[in-house]
Image (cartoon, rainbow, N blue to C red):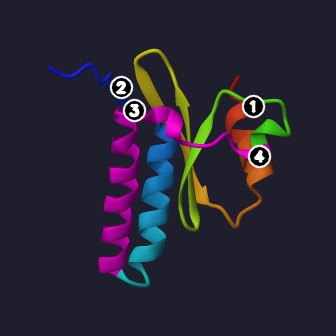
Amino acid sequence: MSDERRYRIEFTDASEADLEAIHDYLVAHDPHAADLLLDRLVEKAVSLASFPDRGSIPDDLAAMGVHDHRQLLLSPYRMIYHVGPEIVAIVLIADGRRDMRALLRYRLLTAR
């Protein structure tokens, strides 16, 4: 029997839309690569069930005084998530080359 705690992984509606938009964009260029990337992003999210605190606090959010979210990277994509008592909520998946501060402010701070 393991003492390892397992968290439930949940994608918000917005992060599901992010995945769909990323996949749809890439399908137009390379359908096989689009499917592989989607699988890798989902695997990365599911891996948080065992060790959710391994991600770093995004500098963009820390600069805005937000310290309750973490991120994992799958270059060039950033996956932003929140760790709750039983759930890891994936709240944003985006190309890190975007204006992340504006995107994070809109997605996380306006929803509070």
Residue topped by disc 4 = 59
Q: At label 1, which amino acid type do we have?
A: Leu
SS at badge 3: strand
User: In the image, is 84 to the left or to the right of 59?
Assistant: left
Q: Position of residue 76 (x, y in %)?
A: 58, 68
SS at badge 4: helix
Labels 4 and 3: the sequence-earlier one: 3
Labels 4 and 2: the sequence-earlier one: 2
Residue 11 seen anywhere in this rendered image of the structure: no
Kindly check if marks 3 and 2 are in contact, taking CB atoms under 8 A apart as contact. Answer: no
Q: Residues within 10 Å of mark 1 (few under 14, many from 20)?
A: few
Kindly check if marks 3 and 1 are in contact, taking CB atoms under 8 A apart as contact. Answer: no
Residue topped by disc 2 = 7
Q: Quadrant of residue 81?
A: top right
Q: Nearer the viewer, mark 3 or mark 2?
A: 2
Kindly check if marks 4 and 2 are in contact, taking CB atoms under 8 A apart as contact. Answer: no
Q: Residue at x 40, y 56 (%)?
A: 41
Labels 3 and 1: the sequence-earlier one: 3
Residue topped by disc 1 = 109
SS at badge 2: loop
Measure the C-alpha gap from mark 1 to mark 4.
15 Å
Measure the C-alpha gap from mark 4 to mark 2.
25 Å
SS at badge 1: helix
Q: At label 2, which amino acid type do we have?
A: Tyr
Q: Residue at x 70, y 67 (%)?
A: 97
Q: Residue at x 47, y 38 (%)?
A: 13
Q: Which residues are magenta?
A: 31-60
Q: Position of residue 11 (x, y in %)?
A: 42, 37
Measure the C-alpha gap from mark 2 to mark 1.
24 Å
Please tell me the numbered disc located at residue 10: 3
Measure the C-alpha gap from mark 4 to mark 3.
23 Å
